[in-house]
Image (tube, rainbow, N blue to C red):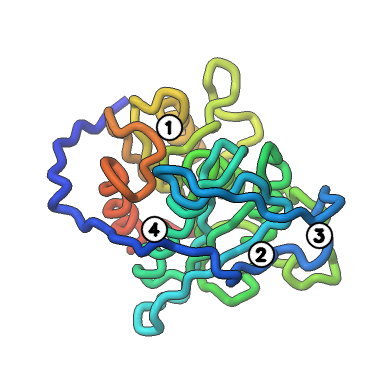
Amino acid sequence: MKRLFLIISFSQFLIFNFAHAQYLNKAVEIWPKEVPGETEKKDLVWSERPGDGRCFFGVTSPTLEAFTPDVSKSNGKAVIVCPGGGYGMLAYEKEGQEVAQWLAGLGYNAYVLAYRVPNNRLGALQDIQRAIRLVRSKGASQIGVIGFSAGASLSCRACTRWSEPAYEANPKDKVDTLSCRPDFGILIYPAYLDEGPNHTLTPELTVTKDTPPLFVFGTEDDVRYSGPSTPVIMQAMQQAGAPIEVHYLTKGGHGYGMRHGAGLLWPVLAAQWLTNPPVR
């Protein structure tokens, strides 16, 4: 496999400075009544973590928090942001709000998804399918997903399992009649894409020629997560004839968000890709 060896002067790239983001009750619940599989609504469990900022450790009532671009910059497109956290928690500020602010600066309507955790992969898939439909109901011309680590796993599941309803749609709910297929996906240090035998593609991921175009950024030294996951999804997309752009560095690690190291590089590359993604 061809690997990228880069010597980078990070002073050449724009460094994003973010004000401390807050959760200001502007998030809306994505399920109109009952949440599938949940018997009761529980309080949101969150705390501050050094290096990560605000994190959610318990979500039973999933929400979308909107970040709107200036009218002069708006391109009419939307992106749903999925923070990572091993499906056990959500790095909501570092991999959610800060990314949504960056996307809004590029002209996108950005929505941070607080999907169900901990340890509820089915619930998380139900949540992102519902979230895509909900954002589509607002009239966006294109809807993409971006995720980090486990959030990238969830984004990839949304891109490869959109034809398999994860929950029983309510025929009386107009939102549930809409498509949950993303128009494109961005996977940053993706995890859990290699859960097949001998680190092959995770069996639940069905990659076909109709899989939405993907942008993937990972590093070889991220040995537990994007190290093996990146080449696996690249091979699957190439074999299916689906568009993919991959940036696979030798070093970079994991969990950097947009704050340091490789986290200063991928936004530049992703912004370039977003100017003309091979959407179909």
Left or right: 151, with 129 as reference point? left
Amino acid tagged 4: Pro
Residue identified by numbered label 1: 226
Mark 4 vs mark 2: in front: 2
CA distance separating discs 1 and 3:
33 Å
Tag 4–tag 1 contact (CB < 8 Å) = no
Left or right: 102, with 209 as reference point? left
Residue identified by numbered label 4: 277
Q: Is residue 100 above or below residue 56?
A: below
Residue 209 visible within the image: no
CA distance separating discs 3 and 4:
30 Å
Instruction: Answer with mark 2 or mark 3, whichever residue precedes in sequence.
Output: 2
Q: Nearer the viewer, residue 159 or 51?
A: 51
Q: Is residue 64 above or below residue 87?
A: below
Quadrant in which the N terminus appears: top left
Name the secondary structure under disc 4: loop
Residue at horizontal 26%, vertical 41%? 261
CA distance separating discs 2 and 3:
11 Å
Amino acid tagged 2: Arg
CA distance separating discs 4 and 2:
21 Å
Amino acid tagged 3: Ala
Name the secondary structure under disc 3: loop
Tag 1–tag 3 contact (CB < 8 Å) = no
Q: Is residue 40 above or below residue 217?
A: below
Amino acid tagged 1: Ser
Instruction: Answer with mark 1 or mark 2, whichever residue precedes in sequence.
Output: 2
CA distance separating discs 4 and 1:
22 Å
Residue identified by numbered label 3: 169
